[in-house]
Image: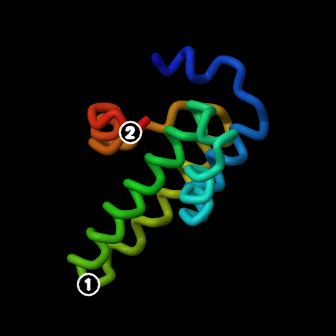
Amino acid sequence: MSNENMNMGLTSDDKLWAALGYVFPIIAIVVLFMEDKKARPYIKFNAVQSLVATVALTIISTVTFGCGTILFLVMFWWAYQAYQGQDVKIPMISDFIKNQGWA
């Protein structure tokens, strides 16, 4: 499904759930267990992307002995973009998710 089709018909509920997944990754996990939310492509894509980004940032932070922790601030920017209904493009991660067929 193309991004244009995915963003057509977005509700404020879709945008809110997508944004919350970036700020609170546990919400992204919960979303993936909720059938009605998981069925919404925008919510599912952002939930999966936020989880993969959280794992990647955690690994970077661990490898740099905590110096990479500042990178977690970018999650707020991605949450803002999701809440605005924009396509959140995270270098390497967005393409990885699509190529794996996860969202």
Marks 1 and 2 sit apart, C-alpha to C-alpha, by 30 Å
Q: Earlier in the sequence, mark 1 or mark 2?
A: 1
Q: Residue 73 in the image: state x and y as whole percent.
A: 50, 64
Single out the mark in the foreground, 1 or 2.
2
The kind of secondary structure element at disc 2 is: loop
> In the image, 17: left or right of 58?
right
Q: Is residue 76 visible?
A: no
Q: Which residue is mark 2?
A: 102
- Label 2 is placed on what type of residue? Trp
Q: Residue 5 in the image: state x and y as whole percent.
A: 56, 15
The single residue placed furthest to the bottom in the displayed view is 65
- Label 1 is placed on what type of residue? Phe
Residue 81 sits above or below residue 61 on the image: above
Q: Quadrant of the C terminus?
A: top left
Tell me which residue sits at (62%, 45%) in the image: 18
Tell me which residue sits at (39%, 74%) in the image: 69
Q: How is the image coloured?
A: rainbow
Tell me which residue sits at (34%, 33%) in the image: 101
The single residue placed furthest to the right in the displayed view is 12
The image quadrant that residue 21 belongs to is bottom right
Q: Which residue is mark 1?
A: 65
Q: Which mark is residue 44?
A: none
The kind of secondary structure element at disc 1 is: loop
Asked if the residue at tag 2 contacts the one at tag 1, i.e. Cβ–Cβ closer than 8 Å, the answer is no
Residue 44 or 8: which is nearer the viewer? 44
The single residue placed furthest to the left in the displayed view is 63
The image quadrant that residue 66 belongs to is bottom left
Q: Residue 34 in the image: state x and y as whole percent.
A: 65, 49
